[in-house]
Amino acid sequence: MTNNKDQFTPDLIKNEVIERNKKIGQDACEIIASAIQAADPYQCVVNNISNDGGIIRIGSREISESEYDRIFVIGMGKASPPMARAVIDVLENKIEFATIVTKDQRFLSESGYGGLLSIHIGDHPVPSTGSIKATRTILEKIPTLTSKDLVIVLISGGGSALFTLPAPGISLGDIQRMTALLLRCGADINEINSVRKRLDVVKGGGLAKILNPAQVHTLILSDVIGDPLDMIASGPTVPDSTKTKDALNIIEKYNLEPELPNSILLHLKKEIAGENGNLSPASPGNFIDANHVLIGSNFTSAKAAHKKALALGYNSQIISTHLTGMTKNVAEFLGGIIETEIIHNVPIQKPACLIFGGETTVKVTGSGLGGRNQDLALHMVQRLAGKEGILFISFATDGDDGPTDAAGGAVDGLLYNDDVLEQALDVQKFIENNDAYHYLEQTGALIKTGATGTNVNDLVVIIIDKLV
């Protein structure tokens, strides 16, 4: 079963820099498009769920008709609409209802799909009143459940902000302030979600607690490096691996305590002292016989990119799908790999396509606009100056890089020289002001695809022609 409603095409990636690189530019677009298509949420779900002769298969589990009375579908995250469509198409009239929260308004047109789907809109990366309203609406729709009920939970990136219900005594404004501080200081997603889980009713296994005693089957599209299930969307149905002391250590690490709302600090300190009875961790009993199925990840996309690069005639290698760190440091690391490839044909012979997956971080000190992929691309501009036959692309697989309408950026050896000679743009000033968006926009290097419909971290694709 396939559904090409949201097919991602190579042309969506093109910009001025990519097009002037002709063949390697077109090849790069095809490589990235293949990566996005491989993580298509609809197909990833269909690959992991079936309905055959009264037996429902979810991952490796099989459930017969005698084991359940009702089926409910709950989803949260940027990819939850196509995921929900897939479950509805597979299970058809067996579902009582499907209700999800996502970010992109365009998905509202799919509300009512199959006569079952209701779609709610929240915000990401900072939650909004819409996020809380959507979460409350979803929870209120859930009836009293029994052990004969089957709940299919669909989780994808963005779920932490979209599906949120602050603990008693903590306001939305408090959560927004905390989230903004964590994003600005350079904390990674594991650190951010470790704090979030301590302050929210539905995170850290909280949803599993609410759904108990129903049978809960969770399909997860990962946007977190290494795919730790309890960190993806802050693990609403997964046992929590973190403790309150971890959250406090993260706050101390980034010196956030002076700026955090008092309600958050008070909540954490009460919880660690065992005084907070309002937000008890989900008990182990909520996860008995729980089924968690990882249906797609960054590695899924990286493998597809590698396969396409080989088909296009490149020697290709996935160097890592754990690319992390501050963009400045990652750029230095990648610059060294490029130099080694140019001089020594290492790690592979040219023409080469080097593939990386992961998620970098940016410490925001300026007042500009951008995202981690754009910032990484900006840091590569001077490193690639004058080097012909090289194309560098850093791309957010969801098409949504930071608080912008861009997915990332493309850099070649001409970009820096053209900017200096024709536009007199000072790269360093844009870097210092965290203004990658406007630099890349002015130079034709910005990539705008719109929402891709999936979310499996970021990809870096580096093509080095054989003539370099």
Image (spheres, rainbow, N blue to C red):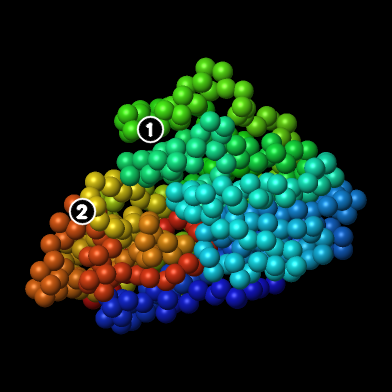
| Discs 1/2, front | 1
Looking at the image, residue 278 lies above or below residue 368: above
Specify which label sits upstream in the sequence, 1 or 2. Answer: 1
User: Label 2's element?
Assistant: loop
User: Which quarter of the figure is the N terminus placed in?
Assistant: bottom right
Residue 170 lies left or right of residue 369; in this view the side is right
Q: Which mark is residue 178?
A: none
Q: How many marks?
A: 2
Of 159 and 55, nearer the camera is: 159
- Three-letter residue code for mark 2: Asn
Can residue 349 be seen? no
Q: Residue at x 57, y 32 (%)?
A: 168
Residue 135 lies left or right of residue 149; in this view the side is left
* Residue 444 % position (x, y): 26, 74
- The quadrant holding residue 420 is bottom left
The crowd level at tag 2 (other Cα within 10 Å; few <14, some 14-19, many 20+) is some
Kindly identify which residue carries mark 1.
260
- The quadrant holding residue 430 is bottom left
Give yes or no for contact between labels 1 and 2 (Cβ–Cβ under 8 Å): no
Kindly identify which residue carries mark 2.
433
- Three-letter residue code for mark 1: Leu
Residue 450 lies left or right of residue 87; in this view the side is left
Can residue 164 be seen? yes
* Residue 445 % position (x, y): 27, 71
